[in-house]
Structures are given as structure tokens and as C-alpha cells.
């Protein structure tokens, strides 16, 4: 009996000690984190901006009112041990109409080593989730196990407004009294500013922030590299499967605004009257209007970042090719069989995806992709669409950043084992990096148990990524079994230029030997991507 009581007392003491250690004081509030591993703490749902509600719908985020937070907490420790509401989801196809989530969603999740404290100056990974600027719930991409593996970094994962809530546009938004362009992208910038002011409290170093994202998150990273935003918000970038979606003008988005307003029952009056109606409409009404827009026949029928002339000042590829980008080290890559355009006629897919392409432009793209370059017609169709939509960011960023100051490129070649996809499809690395995750509709997901071989490969990936976060080089803290990842160069002998890593499991299914190899970028791929890049103004990416 005495031994049982003693053990309970010791357990309670340890729990109390851990809880005390897992409280972070940011000056205006104290937050209690969740000790998810003995060496990792997750601080979940920390607000970085004011709730974008009521009249703030479709407007730039307001900086967090820290006095309000302090007054509301009344000196008590705020519970940050549970995931917050995710942002309103848009539809992703099929029977999904989106609409789940909350508008009061401008939060970050912070993953830190246990006992990290102010002044530790740990490098920071700032993660921007993908989902086509339409959907995404950061809970589905957790980082607790990254900290467990490498308890010498801090990770910040951001919630930002999506679909119409984040990217509704009409030319009248040029007057900020009416609305703001690119609200969802401005959310990301506001979160980076909050990190600069507060991450030190969690042990992070605001001068060593690496932005990282996949798909639309990778597209966001690319936009940050060329955006007109405050310098010093980040010092490195990892862009995975960069979503090279079109970045239209406000005039091109106006028909979408009018369509959306009409389907929400707000189609009468001038733009201020329409917006007043939209700001008073229920989330369910707006969700149905988003769904109607997605399935409309408008040439521009998606809510995405636009060229606003203020923050997003042009198309990323054009700006990068003209040398107008932040000089930071970069990792950039794509999966082996990457596309989001579906099957069928590649010319029709390109025209549908990029209305600015002329028939002559499309023929130029097809002409440098002869069937003889591919194993099958199906592979050709996939590559031709995939390169414009995703893949060629690897060549564009890899080349431009190779001396500004350095870049590393990759081809991810490990299929998601739970999907019946042919080859290594878009987002396959997410399954491996985030505990076997597959995203579903309306913020849901499924985690599938991973094998020892898969876990060993995931550890290699995480080590490369976090080595780059720590020192701007994926090799310094890689696993001993992993090969040296050569930087991407445009000059040198034929054996050294344009080399990249192929990321894959050991074919012999060993947990102690790496399957990663080094290859040279194929000449025909370089040729195709040069043509794709030359069409950036027409593709608007």
C-alpha cells in the first residue's frame, strides 16, 4: 500500500514538474503545452492575429491585440494542449462541398524541445500547408516526431484563410477601405511577423527562420521569395512540389467575384453593397457559393493568390528569371510522377489550367516533348501537364538560387503505399514525412501504420530537412547512412552540373542502408522546362 501511494506521489510530482516546464510566457500570456514525447512539447492554437470576423471578413489580418489577450487570460495559464479549429474548408471534388471549420482560425501550432527557453536561439522551421489554397488542416501534418528525432529546432505550423475566405478578389479591393487582395497570403506574412516578435519565448531564433511548404504551400514559399514584404522574415526556403497555379489579375477575377456573390444571394447593388451582404452571410451560404464557383465554366474559377501590385507584384517565374528574389539558400523538388491535371488530352488540360496560353504556346510545349522521350503516351501526358503545373519549379528555382547563395534539388521516388496510383504521385512524401497521413474531406485525415523500413526512410528525410533548417545545408546533420546531397550547379564538368538526389527507400528493404542515390538532371527535361519557363507570362505562374 505504501509503495503504491509513493509511486502515485512520484508520478504526480513528475507530471506537475513537466507541466510547469511546459508553460511558456510570451509576455502578454502564459501558454501550457502538451508533452507529446519526453523531449517534445506541442503548443497548439496560439493566436497570431485578430479573428477575421464580421467586417474583417475578406480583409487583411489585424495584428494580435496582446492587451486583449492579457486581459482575457487574467493572469491564468492558457491551455494550449489541444488542436484549434481549422480554417473554413473549400470543396475538393466529388460530393464534398467544404464548409467545415471556423473563421476564427488565425493560429499557429508550435513544436519545441522540452525545456527550451528564451535565449536558446534554436533555428525555426515555418511550415505552410498545401491543399490548393482551398483546403488543409495542420493537424493532419504533425511535427511532434520531428522534434523527438531532432530536439534542436522549433517548428511553427500555420493556419491561414482558404478559398473565398482567403482569396476573394475584385478590382475595387485596390481601395483598402473596401477589402484586401490576397488576405490568406497576408495571413502568412502576419504569422511570420508574429514569429519575429515572439518565437524567442519558445527557444527559437527569429533570425534563423526557414519557410517550408508543399504544393500550394510550396507555391506560397515561391511567392514569399519574390513578394514585396519586409526583409528578414525568413533566411532559407524549402519548396516541395511547388504549385505553379496561375496568378491572375483582379480584372480576370471579377467575373468569379460576381458569380460568387450572386450564388450567395448578394448579387444586387454596387460592390460595397455586395460585400456588406457577403460579410453578413452565413458560412454555409458562402460554402455553397464556393462549390458552385468550383464547378462553373468560368475560365478563372478558383480563388487563389493574384497579382495585386502591392505584395504579389508579378508572376513568380518571371521575377525569378529576372533576378528579383530574396537571396537565401533553397531546397526544391518534385515527385517522379507529378501532376494535378488529370488524364486525357494534354493540350486541353493545359488550356483549361492556363487560359492565357495560345494554341501556338501549347504547340511549343508539346513540340519539345516527343513521345520518344517517354515510356508511354500516358506518361507523356502526365509529364507535359505536370511540368507546367508543378515540376519545372525545380529547374527554375534550382538554377536561379544555385549562386544566391546555394540550392539543392531532388526527385522524390517513393510511392504512397496506401494509394493505387501509378508511380510516385503528387504529395507522396507527405505520407512518409507525417506518420502515414492521407488527407480527406473537410479537414479529416487517416494515419496508416508505417513499417520499420518506412520509418527508417522517413528519418533520413527529416534529417536532411532539419539539417538545412539548422545550418542552411542538408548534409551537415544528415544520417550517417545517407549519401552526400550535391548542390545544384549550372557550371562545371558534365559530371557535376545539375546533379540532384533521388529520395527513395532501400530497394532491399534494409533499415540500416540508404536507398537514396544521386542522378544528373536529364537533358530532355532541362530542355522542356526551359520552354515551360519561357511561357510564365502566358501561364501566369
Image (spheres, rainbow, N blue to C red):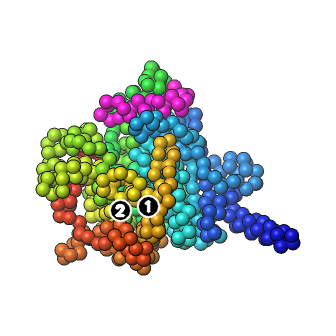
At horizontal 58% and vertical 34% (from top left) the residue drawn is 54
The answer to whether 513 appears left or right of 188 in the picture is left
Coordinates of residue 4 in the picture (x, y in percent): 82, 69
Residue 432's disc number: 1
- Give how far apart the Cα atoms at labels 1 and 2 are: 9 Å
Q: Secondary structure at mark 1?
A: helix
> What residue does disc 2 label?
414
Total numbered labels = 2
Expressed as whole percent of the image width and height from the top left, the position of residue 267 reads: 44, 22
Q: Is the N terminus in the top left, top right, bottom left or bottom right quadrant?
A: bottom right
Q: Is residue 84 left or right of residue 136?
A: right
Q: Which residues are magenta?
A: 275-301
- Sequence order check: which comes first, mark 1 or mark 2? 2
Q: Are marks 1 and 2 in contact (CB under 8 Å)?
A: yes
The circle drawn on residue 117 is none
Vertical order, 402 against 372 (above or below): below
* Magenta highlight on residue 279: yes
The residue positioned 35% from the left and 51% from the top of the image is 420
Amino acid at each position: 500500500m505504501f509503495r503504491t501511494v509513493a509511486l502515485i506521489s512520484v508520478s504526480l510530482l513528475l507530471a506537475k514538474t513537466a507541466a510547469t516546464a511546459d508553460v511558456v510566457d510570451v509576455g502578454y500570456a502564459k501558454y501550457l503545452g502538451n508533452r507529446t514525447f519526453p523531449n517534445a512539447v506541442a503548443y497548439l492554437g496560439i493566436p497570431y492575429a485578430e479573428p477575421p470576423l464580421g467586417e474583417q471578413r475578406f480583409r487583411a489580418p489585424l495584428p494580435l491585440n496582446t492587451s486583449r489577450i492579457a486581459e482575457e487570460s487574467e493572469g491564468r495559464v492558457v491551455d494550449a494542449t489541444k488542436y484549434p479549429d481549422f480554417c473554413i474548408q473549400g470543396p475538393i471534388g466529388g460530393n464534398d462541398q467544404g464548409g467545415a471549420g471556423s473563421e476564427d482560425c488565425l493560429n499557429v501550432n508550435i513544436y519545441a524541445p522540452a525545456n527550451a527557453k528564451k535565449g536558446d536561439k534554436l533555428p525555426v522551421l515555418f511550415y505552410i500547408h498545401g491543399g490548393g489554397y482551398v483546403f488543409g488542416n495542420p493537424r493532419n501534418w504533425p511535427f511532434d516526431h520531428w522534434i523527438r528525432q531532432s530536439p534542436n529546432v522549433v517548428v511553427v505550423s500555420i493556419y491561414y484563410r482558404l478559398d473565398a475566405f482567403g482569396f476573394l478578389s475584385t478590382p475595387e479591393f485596390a481601395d483598402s477601405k473596401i477589402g484586401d487582395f490576397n488576405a490568406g497570403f497576408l495571413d502568412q506574412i502576419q504569422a511570420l511577423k508574429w514569429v519575429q516578435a515572439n518565437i524567442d519565448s519558445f527557444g527559437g531564433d527569429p533570425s534563423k527562420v526557414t519557410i517550408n511548404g508543399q504544393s500550394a504551400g510550396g507555391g506560397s514559399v515561391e511567392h514569399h521569395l519574390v513578394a514585396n514584404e519586409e526583409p528578414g522574415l525568413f533566411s532559407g526556403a524549402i519548396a516541395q512540389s511547388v504549385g505553379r497555379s496561375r496568378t491572375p489579375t483582379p480584372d480576370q477575377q471579377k467575373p468569379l467575384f460576381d458569380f460568387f456573390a450572386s450564388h450567395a444571394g448578394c448579387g444586387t447593388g454596387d460592390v460595397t453593397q455586395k460585400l456588406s451582404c457577403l460579410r453578413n452571410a452565413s458560412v454555409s451560404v458562402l460554402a455553397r457559393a464556393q462549390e458552385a464557383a468550383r464547378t462553373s465554366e468560368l475560365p478563372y474559377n478558383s480563388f487563389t493568390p493574384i497579382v495585386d501590385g502591392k505584395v504579389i507584384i508579378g508572376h513568380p517565374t518571371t521575377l525569378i528569371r529576372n533576378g528579383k528574389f530574396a537571396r537565401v539558400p533553397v531546397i526544391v523538388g518534385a515527385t517522379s510522377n507529378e501532376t494535378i491535371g488529370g488524364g486525357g488530352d494534354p493540350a486541353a488540360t493545359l488550356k483549361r489550367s492556363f487560359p492565357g496560353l495560345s494554341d501556338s504556346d501549347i504547340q511549343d510545349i508539346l513540340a519539345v516533348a516527343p513521345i520518344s522521350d517517354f515510356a508511354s503516351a500516358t506518361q507523356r501526358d502526365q509529364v507535359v501537364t505536370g511540368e507546367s503545373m508543378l515540376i519545372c519549379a525545380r529547374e527554375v528555382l534550382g538554377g536561379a538560387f544555385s549562386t544566391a547563395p546555394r540550392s539543392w534539388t531532388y526527385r522524390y521516388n517513393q510511392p504512397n503505399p496506401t494509394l493505387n496510383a501509378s508511380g510516385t504521385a503528387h504529395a507522396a512524401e507527405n505520407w512518409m514525412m507525417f506518420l502515414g497521413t492521407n488527407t480527406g474531406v473537410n479537414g479529416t485525415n487517416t494515419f496508416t501504420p508505417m513499417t520499420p523500413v518506412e520509418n527508417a526512410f522517413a528519418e533520413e528525410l527529416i534529417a536532411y530537412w532539419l539539417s538545412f533548417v539548422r545550418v542552411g545545408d542538408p548534409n551537415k546533420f544528415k544520417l550517417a547512412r545517407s549519401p552526400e546531397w550535391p548542390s545544384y550547379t549550372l557550371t562545371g564538368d558534365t559530371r557535376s552540373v545539375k546533379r540532384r538526389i533521388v529520395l527513395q527507400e532501400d530497394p532491399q528493404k534494409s533499415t540500416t542502408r540508404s536507398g537514396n542515390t544521386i542522378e544528373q538532371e536529364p537533358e530532355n527535361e532541362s530542355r522542356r522546362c526551359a520552354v515551360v519557363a519561357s511561357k510564365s507570362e502566358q501561364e501566369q505562374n
